[in-house]
Amino acid sequence: MNSDSLQPTAKWKARKAPDENLELFVSKFGNLLGKVLWSRGFNNPEAENLKSFLDPKLQEIKSPSLMKNMDESIERLCLAIQKNERVCIYSDYDMDGIAGLSLLYSFLKACNIGNVMHFQPHRFDDGYGVHPAALEKLAKEENVSLVITVDTGTTAVEAVERANELGLDVIITDHHAAKEILPATPWLINPNQPGDTSELGYLSGTGMAFYFCMALRQKLREQGHFKNFKEPDLRQWLDLFCLGTIGDVVDLRGDNRALIRAGLGYLINTSRPGLKVLIESCVSADQLSRLNARDLAFSVIPKLNAASRMGKAELSTELLLTPFRDRAEDLVEQILELNEIRSATQNEIMIEATAQAQEQSKSGAQVIVVCGEWHEGVLGIVAAKLVEEFSKPAIVLSKVSEEIEEELNEESTEQLRGSVSLRGSMRSPAPFHCLNLLAGAEQDLIQFGGHQAAAGMKLYETELDSLRASLNSTFERLYLGDNFDSSVEQSYDAELSINDDLKVNDVMSLASAEPFGAGNPEPTFLIRAFPGEHFSFLKDRHLKVKNIFGVPELIGFNHAKKFRELCEAGATAVDLLVVPELNVFRNQAKAQLRIQAIRSATPKL
C-alpha cells in the first residue's frame, strides 16, 4: 500500500463565497488581483485599509517602545556602552538567529560600539537555548557583563538564575511563546509575554533585533552619540530582516509586510559581500530583478540553513558579516557543499521515516512519531515532508547518546541516569497546534517549545511509547469532538474558467499583493482540465500542460505520479489548484500556472 492511499484527502475550500463585491474588484484590479484582494477579506475596493495593504509605508510601522521592557532594556545597554562593558550577543543557530545576530552585531559596530562579541551554541554539542554553562564561560573567560539574546531566552529560567548568581545581566529579545514561569530579569522583551500590549507578536527573532536597534538608535541620538559620525540608516539592515523573517515563516502582515516590501529592494542591491555572492550563486540574472519572498524561501535561505543543519552555523554567520568578497566566495563554496550533503542525508532519512509513518498511519495513529539513529540537522525538514505526505502532525526523533544527569529532577529514578535520550522536531498542518499537543504529553518530555506549526522537544527513549499514546490521546480529546472539524484544509482564492485569457500583465499585477508567505499565502486558483493531448511528462516526474485558456503552459513539479493514478482510475477530468507566476528567460517573461495540487474532478467545480 502506498502513502497516497493512506493520507486523508485535504479539503479544498474557497476562502470566501462569491458576493456582489467580486465584480467590483475584478473591474478595478483585473481578473487575478481583483479576485485575490476580494478573497482576502477586503469588501470595498476604495477602502483605506486596502490602500495601505497595496502600498504599505515604513513611516507607519509601530514604535518599538510599545513593547514591554524595551525602554528599560535600552537604558541598560546604554549604561554598558558608557562604561565600556563587555557585551555579548547570544543567538539561536537557525536562520532567524543567524540573521538576527548578524543584524544586531553589525548595527552596534556601525554605531562605533566596539566592546562587543557574539556567541551561538552548537546545534549538536549544546542544543537549543541559553545554557548556564555558556553564560558562566562568557562571564569568567570573556569578562562579559551584559548578554543580549536574539531569538531565544524566554524559557531560560535556569540560565538566567545562574547569570544572576554570576552578576551577569541578561537582556532577552525573543518572540517564542512564554510559559508560566519567566526568567528573573527586568529586561525581557517579547511581544508574546503576558502584559505586552504592542500587538507585535508576529515579529520574528530578527524582527525583534531590528526593533531593538530602532529603539537604541533613538536613544543614542538623544544622547548625542552621533555628533562626530554619520548616523546609521537602518534601512540598510532590511536585507537581514528579510532573511530572518521569511526564514522563520512568521506571518507576513502588519509591520512585517511594510518592512519586507522595502527590504527586498535593499536585498537585491545588498552591500554585504557574502549575501551578494550567495544570491549570485542561487538566483539567475533574470530572476534577480524580480526577487520575491518565495525566491528567498526556496533558493537562498535553505543554503544558509544547510550550514546550521550540518552543525556549521558559524559559516553562515561569518558569511553575513564578512566585508571581504574573497572570503565570501570561499564561504559560499563550503556552504553549497554542505547543502549537497544535507540533501543526500535528508533523502536517506526520508525513506526510513516514511516506512515507519506508513505503518503507524495504517494502525490509526493521529500523530506520527518516527525515530531512528538519524542526523539531527534535517529532522525538521523530514517532519515537514511527512506532514505534506500524510496530512497529520509529525514528530521525527533522533537518538542521542549522552550523559544528561543535570537535567534529571529529584523524582527521576537512578535507572534513567546516563540513558539514551531523543531529540526531535515536530511539524503540524492547520488546524492542529504543536504546543497544545505537546502540552498534553508534558509528563513524557524533558523539555519542549516552539510555535503552532513547529516545535522541538527532548525526551528519554524509555518514554517513547508513552509519548505516542499521550499524543494520540490528546489529539482525540482536542480534535475529534463533535464540534470540531479536523479535516486539513487547502484554501484557494477563486475559480478560473478555461475561457479566461490570462496575460503577463495579469500575473504581474499580483506583485501588488506581495510579499506572499505565512499569513498571506500565494494566490491560488481552482481550475478544471481534461486529460488528453495537452498533457505531457518531464523526466517522468513532472507534469506539463500546454495551450489551455491562453496560458502557454501549466507546470506541475512531482505531480506526474498522481496524475497517472487518477487517469488509471478512470478520471475524465481533473481539478487543479494553480499559482499564477512568470517564467522569465533571457529577459522574456511568459505567464505560467504552477500546479500546487491535483485531484479527480468533483461533480461541481
Image (tube, rainbow, N blue to C red):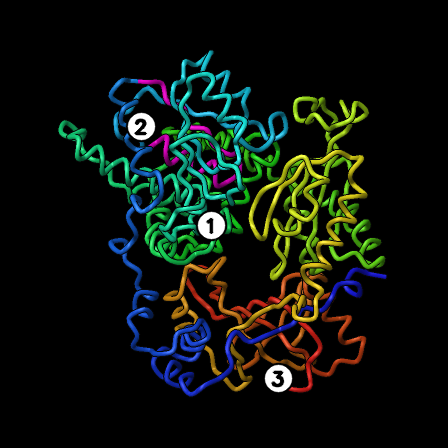
The number of callouts visible is: 3
| Upstream in sequence: badge 2 or badge 3 | 2
Observer-nearest of 433 and 13 = 433
Q: As drawn, which residue projects farthest toward the left?
A: 227
211 lies above or below 365: above
Q: Which residue is mark 1?
A: 246
Closer to the eye: label 2 or 1: 2
Specify whether residue 140 is painted magenta. Answer: no
* Residue 47 picture quarter: bottom left
The residue shown at (47%, 69%) is 590
Q: CA distance from mark 2 to mark 3?
A: 61 Å
Asked whether residue 344 appears in the rendered view, the answer is: no
Residue 604 as seen in the image, left or right of residue 41: right
Residue 49, x across and y down, in percent: 32, 69
Observer-nearest of 436 and 517 = 436
Q: Which residue is mark 3?
A: 605
Quadrant of the drawing holding the C terminus: bottom right
Residue 510, x across and y down, in percent: 41, 68
Q: Which residue is mark 2?
A: 76
Highlighted magenta segment, given as a residue range: 85-106
Residue 193 as seen in the image, left or right of residue 218: right
